[in-house]
Image (cartoon, helix red, strand yellow):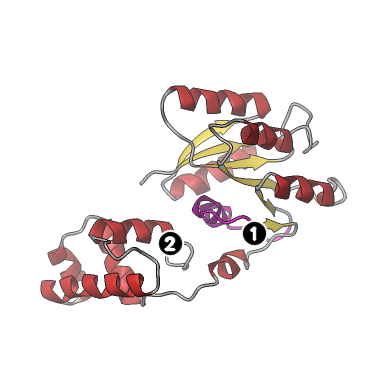
Amino acid sequence: MEITVLLVEDSNIQLKALQSELKEKGWNVIHAQDVSGALFQIEKIAKEKKRIDVAMIDLGIPPVLDDPIKGGIRLIRKIRENPETQSLKILAYTAAGPKEFDYSLILRNLLMLQSSFISLRGEQVDLSSLLEFVWLGYVFVSPTPANFLPKSIAGKPDPLDSKQWETLKFLDQDKSMTKIANEVGLTVEGIKARLPKIRDILIETDEIGPDAETEDLLRWYRKMRTRYARD
């Protein structure tokens, strides 16, 4: 399943880095440099009967450079005012520090607008993984870089062991039962026997519904592999 990301970033250097990171995940990236450009892209996508799954928005975008209230937050407010995009999942970010932006004002606005926030200052931040959590429906605000976030967000114990995750991964890659069996050193019957067990575990832990089939297991895998650090 392809996820479409609206990336709003005015710095070409930052844009190239983020585009590369997101495309490595296999996500489709739509780019805009400012508020008006982002609104144009949203309208264009709607006319094409397509959709944006999640937005990643730099707060210091034009028209007023490095003023988040008139830049990124203004854009997020307009997104929330539009009935077609009011529930769009959003991750706001900035490389500016608290001395440059009033973080308390920013965080109050973003919380009211149900938007997640992460700072890019200091240590390396795995933005693509955090963005995937936002896509899954999590909302978080972190005024300092927080590489611990993925682990803390996961919270719930991983219901499957490594071999069960491996089986789902190979199935998601459209590998045949025979090929999977050869790669893991089992018989085809052994691989087939794993699927009912995986299904039973996920039903028992309320991860999927009682009527789930193999395709439902794969949908669950695609959504939850980041949550459980199983990329």
Residue 157 locus on image (x, y percent): 48, 76
Report whether 175 appears left or right of 86.
left
The amino acid type of the residue labelled 2 equals Met
Magenta stretch: residue 128 in it?
yes
Residue 207, labelled with which disc? none
**Residue depicted at x 73% and y 54%:** 121
> How many residues crowd around disc 1 within 10 Å: few (fewer than 14), some, or many (20 or more)?
few
Element type at mark 1: loop
Left or right of 196? Residue 149 is right
Label 2, label 1: how many angstroms apart (C-alpha)? 23 Å
Q: Which residue lies furthest to the front in this view?
A: 210
Q: Disc 2, disc 1: CB below 8 Å?
A: no
**Residue found at x 48% / y 41%:** 53
Residue 162 within the segment the image draws in magenta = no
Up-down: is 228 above or below 96?
below
Secondary element at tag 2: helix
Is 34 placed above or below 230 here? above
35, 87: nearer the viewer: 87
**Magenta highlight range:** 122-139
Q: Residues within 10 Å of mark 2 (few under 14, many from 20)?
A: some
Q: Earlier in the sequence, mark 2 or mark 1?
A: 1
x, y percentage for residue 30? 51, 33
* Disc assigned to residue 224: 2
Q: Nearer the viewer, mark 2 or mark 1?
A: 2
Q: In the depicted view, which residue is nearer to us: 211 or 67? A: 211
147 relative to 70 in the view: left or right? left
Dot label at residue 124: 1
**At 68% across and 51% down in the image, what residue appears?**
117
Q: Which residue shows up at 68% across the image and 47% down it?
A: 93
Task: Please state, as top left, top right, bottom left or bottom right, where the C terminus lies in the image.
Answer: bottom left
